[in-house]
Image (cartoon, rainbow, N blue to C red):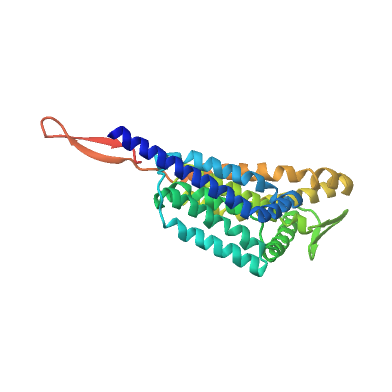
Amino acid sequence: MIMAFEKADQANHLKLKILAAVMTVGLFWVFLPAFREMNNKWMSDPQYSHGYLVPVFSLYLLYSRRNRIANGFPWQIDPRGLAFLAVGAIGYVGAAYINFDYLAVLSFLPIVTGLFVLFGGVSVLRWCWPSVVFLLFMIPLPFRVERMLGDPLQKIATTSSTWLLQTMGFPAFGEGNIIVMEKGKIAVVEACNGLSMLLTFAAITTGMAILVKRPLIDKIILLLSTIPVAVLVNVIRISSNGVAMDVWGPDVAHRLFHDQAGWFMMPMAIVILGFELWVLSHMFIEVPEVQSVFTKTGTKTLAVEKAAK
């Protein structure tokens, strides 16, 4: 009798797996035009070149958090998943109606969530939600949002770099988005506003915050530091270009610091992030729990330390 039930469960799980595979293939077929547009953006715009790595990292998150479903994926139909699928479908159709590509790709996330819930139940959300949310970093921002973020970043980069150069003793002053120095000018153009660095670094910081085993407050501080660190690294790059221009001339500065320094921005930001984690680990010290244990005579007590979990 038990073996019969086990065979029935296996057959039922197989049917659900086949149905899930068919729906997943259909999902990618429906979203194929949106994925093509997104791929073109990844290939042509350096700000989103990290997009290829986002789905890979999302899959890794699923694997690394597999202990959240210790007994394996609970193959079962949960009708509540249809609500997520409906939200995604409405978003996709609405995006086509108003011709808003960002909403079309964004609707992919509730549909993926709906598939997880439909075939595994609401309990699997505890396992899969970080991976689904992380997929946001592969979606290019609308042009209006890019401009809304890029213009202030461009002004901040120009003003801060000018101030840093002046603080170091170099003659520099700002004219709009141009830093005027004794031996030349540094144009902080749109490509130098640091938005590309910010988007990529935000993805890395979020992934690190999910993976590291640290207190919640450490993770929140880590996420909040994304923008300041990205701006700081960009200011250091622009200022280094100004120093090189004043010391070695415009040609050397453009060839070595403008073009090559960009490769060091991300490693520098990661080093700053690691230093930040080191500082946080030394700022807060866990106090061990102390329990009193009576001796056999019952007259004395011993302090027994138990590591706080």
The percent position of residue 71, horizontal first and vertical second, equals 38, 38
**Residue drawn at point x = 64 percent, y = 44 percent:** 53
Name the one closer to the observer, 165 or 258. 258
The percent position of residue 32, horizontal first and vertical second, equals 66, 52
The percent position of residue 216, horizontal first and vertical second, equals 44, 50
Which residue is most to the top?
Answer: 296
**Residue drawn at point x = 75 percent, y = 54 percent:** 165
- One can see residue 216 in this view: no
Count up the numbered dots.
Answer: 0
Which residue is most to the bottom?
Answer: 98
| Quadrant of the snapshot with the C terminus | top left
Horizontally, is 252 left or right of 15 in the view? right
**Residue drawn at point x = 66 percent, y = 48 percent:** 51
Name the one closer to the observer, 41 or 240. 41
Horizontally, is 280 left or right of 302 in the view? right
The percent position of residue 11, horizontal first and vertical second, equals 41, 39
Q: In this view, does 83 lie above or below 254?
A: below
- One can see residue 304 in this view: yes
- Residue 189 falls in which quadrant of the image? bottom right
Q: In this view, does 80 lie above or below 20?
A: below
Name the one closer to the observer, 109 or 23. 23
**Residue drawn at point x = 30 percent, y = 41 percent:** 289
| Quadrant of the snapshot with the N terminus | top left
